[in-house]
Amino acid sequence: MAKDWSIVAQYPDVETDGGTVARQVMVVGTLTAAHGVYFENRYPRTGFKVSQATNNSNGYTIVFENLFTIAGVDAVEWGQKLNSANQLQDYVTVYYLSTSGDSVNFVEVPFSQLTQQHVADLVSAGRKQLDAGEAA
């Protein structure tokens, strides 16, 4: 487990819940060992347990590293964006290569919609477009 990832950041922070409501959180940053994917999880500071961070780091590592089993996937990047309600949402950007490896593109998927099959379908369609562009 722990050999597959490491916690590389941990710090207290404050986050808002769509405006004036704020809560104290602990931010835990994890780095996967195999491909160096960095991601963060935020936990309410009250009642924070290391076991939560450990379990989530392991689970998210499995999800992110499994994306590399999709043909053509070259890199995976976690990030956050503000939505229209001023709340942070997690996104995953998956970079993929054409069959020849000469072209690259990416798909961006909200983490709430992230499934292996969904990303595989998007990457497959994108690779076909890249390959067609190279053949033209």
Image (tube, rainbow, N blue to C red):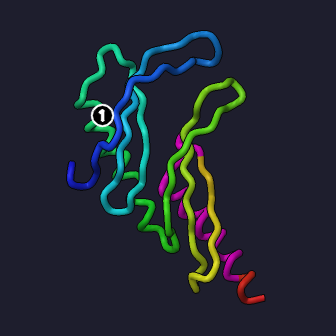
46 to 58, vertically: above or below: above
The image quadrant of residue 35 is: bottom left
Dominant SS in magenta: helix
**Residue 125 showing in the rendered view:** no
Q: Which residue is labeled 1 in the image?
A: 53
9 is within the stretch colored magenta: no
The location of residue 56, given as percent across then percent down, is 33, 38
The location of residue 64, given as percent across then percent down, is 42, 54
78 to 50, vertically: above or below: below
Range of residues picked out in magenta:
110-131
Tally the marks: 1
Give whichever of 70, 89 is nearer the camera.
89
Is residue 120 found left or right of 53 in the rendered image? right
User: Type of residue at label 1?
Assistant: Ala
The residue at 21%/54% (across/down) is: 3
114 is within the stretch colored magenta: yes
Give whichever of 83, 28 is nearer the camera.
28
The location of residue 83, given as percent across then percent down, is 67, 32
**Residue 56 showing in the rendered view:** yes
SS under mark 1: helix
The residue at 28%/51% (across/down) is: 5
The location of residue 81, given as percent across then percent down, is 62, 38
Is residue 29 found left or right of 86 in the rendered image? left
Q: Residue furthest top?
A: 20
The residue at 72%/28% (across/down) is: 84
Image quadrant in which the C terminus is located: bottom right
Is residue 92 found left or right of 128 in the rendered image? left
Give whichever of 75, 135 is nearer the camera.
75
45 to 94, vertically: above or below: above
The residue at 68%/77% (across/down) is: 130
Q: Residue furthest right?
A: 136
Crowdedness near tag 1: few (<14), some (14–19) or many (≥20) residues, C-alpha within 10 Å: many
